[in-house]
């Protein structure tokens, strides 16, 4: 049995390819929306968040032999738990990593974390447009350095997400609830519509739309603060689907 962390578009696509090859598969997703995108029904879907101990028990009970980690590049806990669980159970772990964004823009600030992003963005403008997702919204919204700034958050149009943002005090006028992918043109018009002075984003790669955000910012000459990916020491890593298939064929007999 293969256990696939698939909380991203490319992770789900990898799952579909594995199913076409008739591999026994468990796919873990993070939302009802993610679950609905998995067309093949001959698969076990886990939607329950698992802490480290629960993950170890789940992998053992389902006789998992290989863990494929195609979680979001910024899902640190998921990756770290997967590595530890695989090591404890003496099963194989492979990280599938989407390519990083190729940056061709001088007005970009690469930072290591949310704290550094806050400090730099606060000094670059008063209207800050965040494309970092809903999970970091609370941190930025409650950050004292940004108290006198307008913060706009672009998030998925899910009821739970909007409710969570409203609960911490973020007003509807400062929420852009849209699902990508976003073209350069759409990004540009959104940045203009919300009078953005600076864009804060993550290195989610081209598949995550980082390139179209940067291209739109270039058109408007807006500074971009990009939070770099966390540095994790993955035991094994693949950048192409074919490399994943080769890894599986080596260890799953």
Image (cartoon, rainbow, N blue to C red):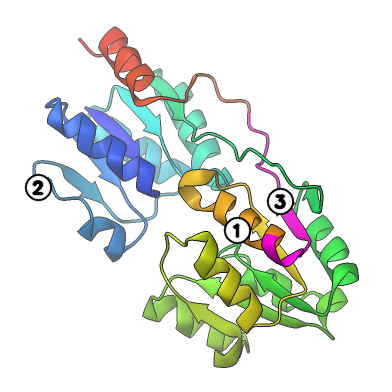
Numbered disc 3: secondary structure: strand
Task: Answer few, some or many: residues within 10 Å of disc 3's Cα (few below 14, many 20 plus, some between 14 and 19).
Answer: many
Q: Earlier in the sequence, mark 1 or mark 2?
A: 2
Residue at 56% of width from left, 55% of height from top? 212
Is residue 134 visible in the rendered image? The answer is: no
Q: Which mark is residue 41?
A: 2
Q: Is residue 96 above or below residue 156?
A: above
Lateral position of residue 184 relative to residue 225, left or right: left
Residue in the foreground of this view, choosing between 184 and 148: 184
Question: Could you give the CA–CA distance between mark 2 and mark 3, rounded to whole angstroms?
Answer: 37 Å
Region in magenta: 219-232
Quadrant of the image occupied by residue 148: bottom right
Q: Position of residue 209 (x, y in %)?
A: 51, 53
Q: Which residue is mark 1?
A: 213
Q: Is residue 62 above or below residue 10?
A: above
Lateral position of residue 41 relative to residue 166, left or right: left
Residue at far left of view: 42
Residue in the foreground of this view, choosing between 192 and 173: 192
Q: Which residue is mark 3?
A: 227
Q: Position of residue 132 (x, y in %)?
A: 61, 62
Question: Could you give the CA–CA distance between mark 3 and mark 1, rounded to whole angstroms?
Answer: 14 Å
């Amino acid at each position: 049995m293969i256990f696939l962390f698939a909380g991203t578009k490319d992770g789900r696509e990898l799952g579909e390819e594995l199913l076409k090859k008739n591999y026994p598969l468990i796919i873990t997703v993070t939302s009802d929306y993610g679950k609905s995108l998995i067309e093949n029904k001959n698969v076990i879907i886990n939607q329950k968040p698992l802490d480290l101990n629960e993950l170890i028990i789940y992998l053992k009970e389902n006789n998992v032999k290989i863990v494929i980690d195609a979680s979001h590049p910024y899902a640190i806990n998921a990756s770290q738990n997967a590595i530890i669980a695989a090591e404890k159970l003496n099963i194989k772990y492979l990280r599938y990593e989407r390519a990083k964004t190729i940056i061709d823009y001088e007005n970009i600030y690469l930072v290591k974390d949310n704290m550094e992003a806050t400090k730099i963005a606060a000094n670059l403008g008063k209207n800050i447009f965040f494309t970092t997702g809903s999970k970091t919204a609370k941190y930025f919204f409650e950050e004292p350095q940004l108290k006198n700034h307008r913060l706009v958050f672009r998030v998925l149009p899910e009821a739970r997400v909007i409710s969570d943002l409203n609960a911490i005090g973020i007003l509807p006028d400062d929420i852009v609830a849209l699902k990508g992918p976003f073209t350069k043109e759409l990004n540009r018009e959104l940045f203009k519509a919300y009078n953005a002075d600076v864009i804060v984003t993550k290195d989610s790669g081209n598949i995550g739309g980082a390139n179209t955000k940067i291209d739109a910012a270039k058109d408007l000459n807006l500074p971009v603060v990009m939070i770099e990916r966390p540095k994790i020491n993955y035991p094994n890593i693949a950048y192409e689907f074919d490399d994943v298939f080769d890894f599986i064929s080596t260890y799953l007999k």
